[in-house]
């Protein structure tokens, strides 16, 4: 009889430990998912803030052809990041916020003219969307 009770107790203990392990794994998985969700939301909030500021600067420069939705496109956001991270290799040669014109020396050493219709670089000619030079100006001009 004692052997049966000990066996049942051991089986119950093993069952309890298995259930606890499943519960802990489920809780850890939910915590990880919540953490990823929180990080993605924070990244989206940062992107919105940056794009809002860029759009404000575009409007200040008189570049009305593009909207905040254009800046939020993934390819455009990559150009914003490129202008920010690689901006050390570019130089703002001239900027007139009243006229909405600027001149930038790009990373290649070429100079590009920018106005309310776009940039003279090949990337702008191809996409008709703001290029990294335009984003560089928007981040670095003195208003």
Image: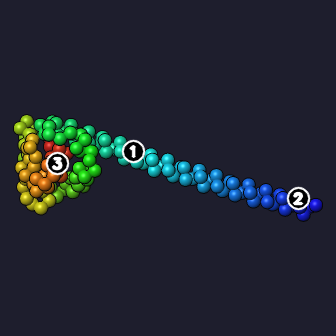
- Classify mark 2: residues with Cα within 10 Å, few (<14), some (14-19) or many (20+): few
* Foreground tag (3 vs 1): 3
Disc 1 secondary structure class: helix
Disc with the residue nearer the chain's start (3 vs 1) = 1
- Classify mark 1: residues with Cα within 10 Å, few (<14), some (14-19) or many (20+): few
Give the residue pinned by disc 2: 5
x and y, in percent, of residue 36 in the image: 45, 50
The quarter in which the N terminus is drawn is bottom right
* Residue 72 found in image quarter: top left
Q: Is residue 73 left or right of residue 61?
A: right
The quarter in which the C terminus is drawn is top left
Give the residue pinned by disc 1: 42
Disc with the residue nearer the chain's start (2 vs 1) = 2
Q: Is residue 114 left or right of residue 12?
A: left
Give the residue pinned by disc 3: 129
The answer, for residue 91, to whether it is visible in the render is no
x and y, in percent, of residue 25 in the image: 60, 55
Q: Residue at x 13, y 52 (%)?
A: 124
The numbered disc on residue 103 is none
Q: CA distance from mark 2 to mark 1?
A: 55 Å
């Amino acid at each position: 009889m004692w052997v049966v009770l000990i066996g049942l107790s051991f089986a119950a203990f093993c069952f309890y430990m298995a259930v606890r392990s499943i519960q802990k794994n489920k809780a850890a998985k939910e915590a990880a998912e919540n953490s990823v969700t929180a990080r993605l939301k924070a990244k989206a909030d940062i992107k919105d803030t940056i794009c809002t500021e860029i759009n404000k600067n575009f409007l200040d420069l008189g570049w009305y052809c593009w909207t905040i939705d254009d800046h939020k496109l993934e390819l455009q956001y990559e150009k914003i990041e490129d202008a920010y991270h690689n901006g050390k290799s570019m130089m703002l040669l001239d900027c007139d916020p009243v006229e909405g014109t600027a001149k930038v020396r790009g990373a290649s050493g070429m100079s590009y003219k920018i106005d309310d219709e776009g940039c003279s670089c090949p990337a702008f000619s191809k996409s008709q969307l703001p290029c990294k030079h335009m984003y560089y100006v928007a981040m670095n001009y003195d208003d």
